[in-house]
Amino acid sequence: MTRARGGGARLRHLMALEPRGPRQLRRLVRGLFGIEVLDVARERGSTPPLAYLSHAFFEPGEGVGLSRDAVVWANRGGGKTMLGAVATLLDLIYKPGIEVRVLGGSLEQASKMYEHLSRLLDLPTMRGVLAAPPSARRVVLRNGSRVEVLAGSQRSVRGVRAHKLRCDEVEEFDPAVWEAAQRVTRSGRCGGRWVGGAVEALSTMHRPGGLMSGLTRNGERLEIPENENIRGTPVKSSGGGVKVFRWNAIDVVARCPPALACEGCELWDDCRGRAKHATGFVPVEDLLSQRGRSSRIAWEAEMMCRRPGVRHAVFPAFDERRHVAPFDQAESTSGSWVGGMDFGLRAPTVMLWACVDSDTLHVVSEYDATDRTLPEHLVWIKRQAEREAIPPAHDLAFVAIDPAGLARNAHSGHSDAALLRKAGYAVRARGQAIAPGIEAIRRRLDHATLRIDPRCTKLIAALRAYHFDPRNLHTQTPVKDGPDHWCDALRYLVTAWETNAPATTGSYL
C-alpha cells in the first residue's frame, strides 16, 4: 500500500479507500490489517463474522429508526474480541470525531480489546494517524476520533456519553453495570456522516439465566444460508430490534489436513467433514485437544454455542427439542385439567394450565401479570381461559398453590385460597420442601412425561434459566431472580398431581 506523507495525509488517503459494501470492507481489512474476515457460515443457523462487521460499520442514515444494537455470541477463541477491535478502529478512521468506549466484565477484560487495538495501530499502514502517543486507556486520532477503556463499575459508566459502547464478555457483567450501560450512547454526526448510538455485546454464553441468555433470546437472529457468502450490500433485516450474530468453532476452523481421517474423529458429530473445505483460522489440532479436555456440556456451551452451560442449572435435562411440543386438545378429550399458581404483586402472579393424559403432563398455556390484586387477576385469567378454550375453573380438578396462600390477609381478612375457592376452583396446597418438588419435575423431564406447548414462552425460558448460586456450591436452594415464579407454579402443580393431595376444605373467610 502506498504511503502518504504526514498523519493528516495518511488519514485522507485512508478515507479515500472507504468501502461501499461487505466485499470491499473485507478487502480493506485484509489490506490494512492483514486479517481475513470470514464471510461464510459453515453451520446452519450461524452468521459469518463479516455479517457483524458490516452491521457495525455501515450506518443506515439519519431518521431510519432501526436499532443499531448488536449481540455477538461466539466461541472461545472465535475472534470476537479482535473483531471488536477492528470495528472500533474502522469507526475511528471513517467516522471523524466519533466517541467509542470499551467496557468489560472487568478492567482486565476490557483491556484485551484495547490491546488488540493498540497492536493494529502499530502496523505500518497506521503510521501517523495518532494525534498523540496512546495512554494506558485512551487513544485519540488526528481527526478527533477517540476511544477509551472503562472499568466495569457503575461509577465508571454513569455520566459517560459515547456514540458506540462495545462490551466484551458480557456474561461476566454485574447486571447493575449492564443496566447503567444502556443509557450511555447517543447518535450524532461524525464528519458529515450520521452515526447511530449503539451498544454492542460480545461474549460466550455459559450461565443459565445469565445476561447473554436473555440477550440472545430477545434479539433477532440474522442467518446467512449455510456455505453461502455475503454478497453485495450490507446485511439487512426487516425488524428493528437488537441483532444477534452467532458463530461457533466449526464456523472458524482452519482447513483440516488430508492426513487427518474423518472416521473416528472426535469432532465428527459437530464437523461432519466440513472442516475439509474450511477457510478459518483455528487449527483443527487445537479443537481436537480442547474437545478432549472438555465435557460434552461445556463443549456445547462454550465452543459450539448451542445452549448455555448447565453446570448450575436446576433442570439441566430440559431440552426444547424433546420437551416442547404443540398440544392437540382434540386428541386429549379424556385428560384431566389442572392448574398451578404462584402469587405476586410487584413480582408476577403466574397461572399455568395443564392437561394430564396417560401420565403425561402437558402444560398448555400460561398467564402472568404484575401490579394487580388477586380478584383482578382472576378476571383476566377467566378471560384468557375462555379465549383459548381452556375448561373453566369448576372443571379443573384442582389449582395448586403455595401453602402460604392459606393464610388470611391482614387487611382483607380473606386468604388467597378462599378467593380462589369463591371463584370456583378446588384448591390444593401441600406443604413440601423445594427439593422434592424439583426432583419430581426432573423425573418427568428424564422420562419425557412433561411437555410444554410452544405458546408457554415464559415457562420455557424459566426452565432454561432457573439456576443455583454459582458462588455457593453448597446450597440446594435455587436463586430467586425471576424464573422462580414460573418454576414454582409448575412445582406446585406437579407435586399436587403426584401426591394426590386432597382439595383443601374448611373456611377461609
Image: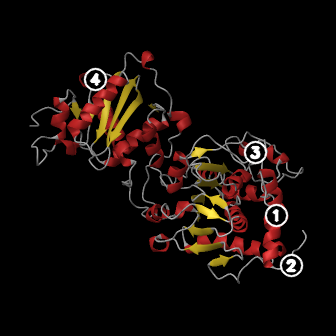
* Residue designated by label 3: 42
Q: Residues within 10 Å of mark 4 (few under 14, many from 20)?
A: some
Q: Earlier in the sequence, mark 2 or mark 3?
A: 2
Disc 4/disc 3 C-alpha distance (Å): 50 Å
Badge 3 amino acid? Arg
Residue 209 position in % (x across, y down): 47, 52
Q: Nearer the viewer, mark 4 or mark 2?
A: 2
Badge 1 amino acid? Ala
Residue 9 position in % (x across, y down): 82, 75
Badge 2 amino acid? Arg
State whether residue 463 appears in this view: yes
Residue 362 position in % (x across, y down): 42, 28
Disc 1/disc 3 C-alpha distance (Å): 34 Å
Q: Earlier in the sequence, mark 1 or mark 3?
A: 1
* Residue designated by label 4: 392
Observer-nearest residue: 117 or 407? 117
Q: Secondary structure at mark 1?
A: loop
Residue at 61%, 49% (x, y): give it: 244
Mark on residue 492? none
Residue at 31%, 39% (x, y): give it: 492
